[in-house]
Amino acid sequence: MLFIRCDDRLVHGQVLFKWTNEKNIKKIVVVDTNTATDLIEKQMILMSKPKNCDIEILRSTEMDCINHDRQEAQMILFKDVQTACSFVANRKIDRMNIGRMASGIGKIKVFNNLFLTQNEISELHQLINEEVFVYYQMVPDENAIDLKKIIEELRS
């Protein structure tokens, strides 16, 4: 089972405790080139590892080596929407969770903790058109919000 999440904070309390417990995650794979090459950030993430869960940190160019047919529950964490969309589209994955994506120049507010560029909106729209369930959910005990209608409205 794969749980795909896009969250610009990557590994943090909600991921480490709520999502890993809810989904019974045994391995977290972080896909972000900057994190993979920053020794301090990488060490901090590896030190925060939950007891019964492994963490692997990959560059974006290494994401093709992720074994997505494993029986073991895995969470694949992406820091940016573009890389996450590429991963999902090329593997025929049917759902992707969007968590916090910070505000910034050129970003449109979708929710309090979700800001997207027009380019990100287009990429998500493409996934949705390919029958991928793209949803916003910060923590497992909140309701998942289907982004289909919102993304379609933001495109027009």
Image (tube, rainbow, N blue to C red):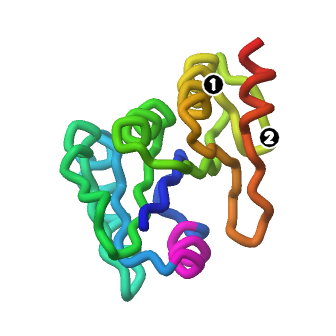
Q: Nearer the viewer, residue 51 or 125?
A: 125
- Is 90 placed above or below 10 here? above
Residue drawn at (31%, 75%) of the image: 54
Q: Nearer the viewer, residue 87 or 50?
A: 87
* Dot 1 crowding, Cα within 10 Å, few <14, some 14–19, many 20+: many
- Amino acid found under the numbered disc labelled 2: Phe
The reply to whether the magenta stretch includes residue 19 is yes
**Which image quadrant: the C terminus?**
top right
Q: Is residue 67 left or right of 103 when viewed as pictured?
A: left
Q: Hey, which quadrant is residue 83 in on the image?
A: top left
- Is 15 placed above or below 67 here? below
Q: Which residues are magenta?
A: 15-23
- Amino acid found under the numbered disc labelled 1: Ile
**Where residue 155 sits: x, y (%)?**
72, 16
The residue singled out by tag 1 in the image is 121
Residues at circles 1 and 2 in contact by the CB criterion of under 8 Å? no
Secondary structure under tag 2 reads strand
- Give me the disc on residue 111: 2
Which residue is outermost to the top? Answer: 156
**Where residue 113 sits: x, y (%)?**
73, 45
**Which image quadrant: the N terminus?**
bottom left
Characterize the magenta stretch by its predominant secondary structure: helix
The reply to whether the magenta stretch includes residue 94 is no
Q: Is residue 140 left or right of 145 when viewed as pictured?
A: left
The number of discs equals 2
Q: CA distance from mark 1 to mark 2?
A: 14 Å
Q: Earlier in the sequence, mark 1 or mark 2?
A: 2
**Where residue 108 sits: x, y (%)?**
73, 24
- Is 74 placed above or below 40 here? below
- Give me the disc on residue 69: none
Residue drawn at (70%, 49%) of the image: 136
